[in-house]
Amino acid sequence: MTRRLFSAALDLFFPPSLLDGGARALTTGLSPEAWSQVTFIDIDAPCCDGCGAPFEYETGLHCAPCQAKPRAFERARAACVYDEASRDLILQYKHADRTKLAPMFAAWVGRAAGALLSEADLIAPAPLHPGRLFRRRYNQAAEIARLVARSAGLSYLPDALLRRRDTGSQAGRSGAGRRRNVASAFEVSPSGVAKIAGRRVLLIDDVLTTGATAEACARALKAGGAAGVDVAVIARVKAAASLPI
């Protein structure tokens, strides 16, 4: 109660800004201009049931890459396309301490992952290496995963996965380079083994580019005993990545 009163008092004297950095507003959120620029993915539109890539029409099949090489995760869904508009918001969230964006992103992810949430037993975030977590001071995927789990009434396991080595940034690497970079980088934590055994895990991350990180996390979760793994992210790259992440 005290915290809410303090927050209300701050808002009275220092009205919150729009989350996209626009002018002061009476409530937090995106400006109409910023909102209209985000390319949201229609949850009812046809897409690959594996990686979530949009289809022009309903086919009931996986896309060619998913058919050619099945992934360790069963399904992936994204709230929007990773482009100039969403990139700026996500980079602010990841690198500029804009943690107030987390509730908005969690709402987006929860809507996009509705079908996955209905089948999930628990939610886990893609982990950061301890060194990077110390420097950044928060795990952007964990902040979203915690809120999605709370909203869905599911168990939240922030330490289900460990990142055994600091893989550095994936930006600028080819698909093969990304896969090599995160190969065997993750493992299920000792405390997570019993909690994920035989259960379906929804993995939360920020951006899906080639799927290398999600694939490596899913392999580790399955090796640790998970019955299945789905993935939900804020945004997915439509084609070859040319934007920094």
Image (cartoon, rainbow, N blue to C red):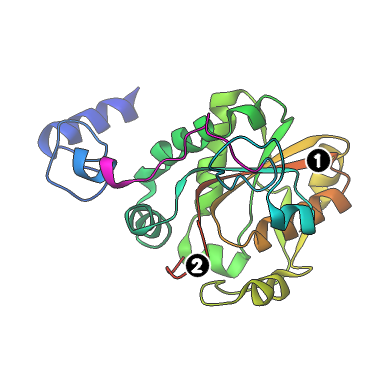
Marks 2 and 1 sit apart, C-alpha to C-alpha, by: 28 Å
Question: Which region of the structure is painted magenta?
Answer: 36-48
The spot of residue 204 in percent (x, y) is 60, 45
Instruction: Tell me which label, 2 or 1, sits earlier in the chain.
Output: 1
Q: Nearer the viewer, residue 81 or 196?
A: 81
The residue at which mark 2 appears reads as: 241
Location of residue 131 by image quarter: bottom right
Inspect the image, locate mark 2, and give the three-letter code of the amino acid beneath it. Answer: Ala
Q: Nearer the viewer, residue 37 or 197?
A: 37
The residue at which mark 1 appears reads as: 228
Q: Nearer the viewer, residue 215 or 55?
A: 55
Identify the residue at horizontal 76%, vertical 70% (top origin): 183
Identify the residue at horizontal 42%, vertical 68% (top origin): 243
How would you rate the neighbour count of disc 2 (Cα within 10 Å): few for under 14, some for 14-19, many for 20 or more?
Answer: some
Secondary element under disc 1, as helix, strand or loop, is strand
How would you rate the neighbour count of disc 1 (Cα within 10 Å): few for under 14, some for 14-19, many for 20 or more?
Answer: many
